[in-house]
Image (cartoon, helix red, strand yellow):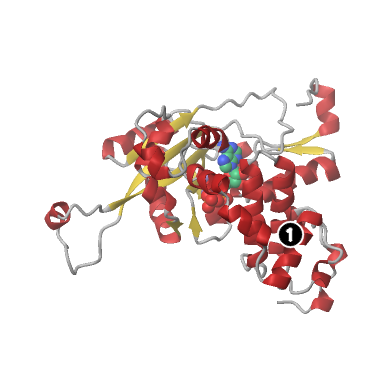
Amino acid sequence: ALEMPAFIATKVSQYSCQRKTTLNNYNKKFTDAFEVMAENYEFKENEIFCLEFLRAASLLKSLPFSVTRMKDIQGLPCVGDQVRDIIEEIIEEGESSRVNEVLNDERYKAFKQFTSVFGVGVKTSEKWYRMGLRTVEEVKADKTLKLSKMQKAGLLYYEDLVSCVSKAEADAVSLIVKNTVCTFLPDALVTITGGFRRGKNIGHDIDFLITNPGPREDDELLHKVIDLWKKQGLLLYCDIIESTFVKEQLPSRKVDAMDHFQKCFAILKLYQPRVDNSTCNTSEQLEMAEVKDWKAIRVDLVITPFEQYPYALLGWTGSRQFGRDLRRYAAHERKMILDNHGLYDRRKLINHFEYIVQ
Ligand code: ATP
Ligand code: MN
Ligand code: MN
């Protein structure tokens, strides 16, 4: 860690895109606490407080030293009263009573479980909670519930999907995606994005961006890839969203807007041959012992036109907070609009389009 004199708090930017952040988090006990608070506010649909804690977490992750005294956070941006109180509690007591209260809260615990199911957000969690449900087990057992196709898959592969994706699994899936895409488009560029591109070694899914250099586009590529996986028995679930990008369309001003690329939220079957040779080592024995030799993995595939690829790469690399701050920085400090499709000059835009404020 850096020596304190080398660090000038007032020079720290409020925007995460203007700060250098490595994967070394010297303040994990604080940032974990903030993330619990943010999640709880998300469950309560209090976006302002949720963002306040996410920004504070992002800021403390960028500090090159561990916070040990209140003096250490003096002059830093993104530290409001709520955040300061929790930092103080943790410094003095080693833990925060406020955070412990949330961790023990019945509603928080239920929402935490529900939202860990693929296809389940705050709205569905609210519904289930009001029905008296509290655990994923209870949801699974309730045969009267109306579930979406996505939620059914989420529950069916629940155990696999909640266990994190490792770097090795990401590399294995990456090979499958690259090989399949290249059978149809040999020059296609397949890039891993999301947390793995940021250097993390675990994730909740694996994100890929696919583009074809040059003017040629293939609207059928995604369908061809999915069809082949279906034939090969590798596809456990998929939801293809067609592109909704229109050239004349205005960029969205929403900081958290979805993009308009053709994409697919899928669950792939990743075979994991057992190296464990103590009990069963032949496929017959595997079958007899009913040992599952595969794992369900969440995969996001996004197809982009080549000219929009850099913006898509920036957006899909994340983190979510980094993206939010990049767009906020573009809007407030540069009078521009950034989204996953491009960077637009607001003054020029106003001349060309009727500007609609969302
Ligand atoms: P994790 O390990 O939990 O997957 P992650 O950073 O990879 O972490 P993702 O939810 O996979 O998180 O998202 C990766 C990035 O892609 C994020 O920055 C997010 O903003 C962006 N993203 C995710 N879903 C969409 C979407 N539907 N439209 C546009 N951007 C998205
Ligand atoms: Mn991801
Ligand atoms: Mn994803």
Q: Quadrant of the C terminus?
A: top right
Res 63 → quadrant: bottom right
Q: Secondary structure at mark 1?
A: helix
To which quarter of the image does residue 305 belong? Answer: top right
Residue drawn where x is 61% and y is 59% of the image: 100
Please name the residue that numbered disc 1 is placed on: 59
Q: Residue 183: in sight, yes or no?
A: no
Q: Nearer the viewer, residue 222 or 56?
A: 56
Give coordinates of residue 339: x percent, y percent.
69, 38
Q: How many marks?
A: 1
Q: Position of residue 344 (x, y in %)?
A: 76, 35
Q: Any atom of ligand 1 within 8 Å of the CB at mark 1?
A: no
Q: Residue at x 74, y 43 (%)?
A: 48
331 horizontally vs 216: left or right: right
Say if residue 111 shows up in the picture. yes
Quarter where residue 351 is shown: top right
Question: Neighbour class for label 1 at 10 Å: few (<14), some, many (≥20)?
Answer: many
**In the figure, 193 relative to 184: above or below?**
below
Q: Residue at x 54, y 47 (%)?
A: 106
Q: Position of residue 148 (x, y in %)?
A: 43, 29
Q: Is residue 204 left or right of residue 307?
A: left
Nearest to the observer: residue 176 or residue 143: 143
In the image, what residue type sits under mark 1? Leu
Residue 161 located left or right of residue 69: left
User: For ligand 1, which image quadrant applies?
Assistant: top right
Q: Quadrant of the N terminus?
A: bottom right
- Residue found at x 54% / y 60%: 200
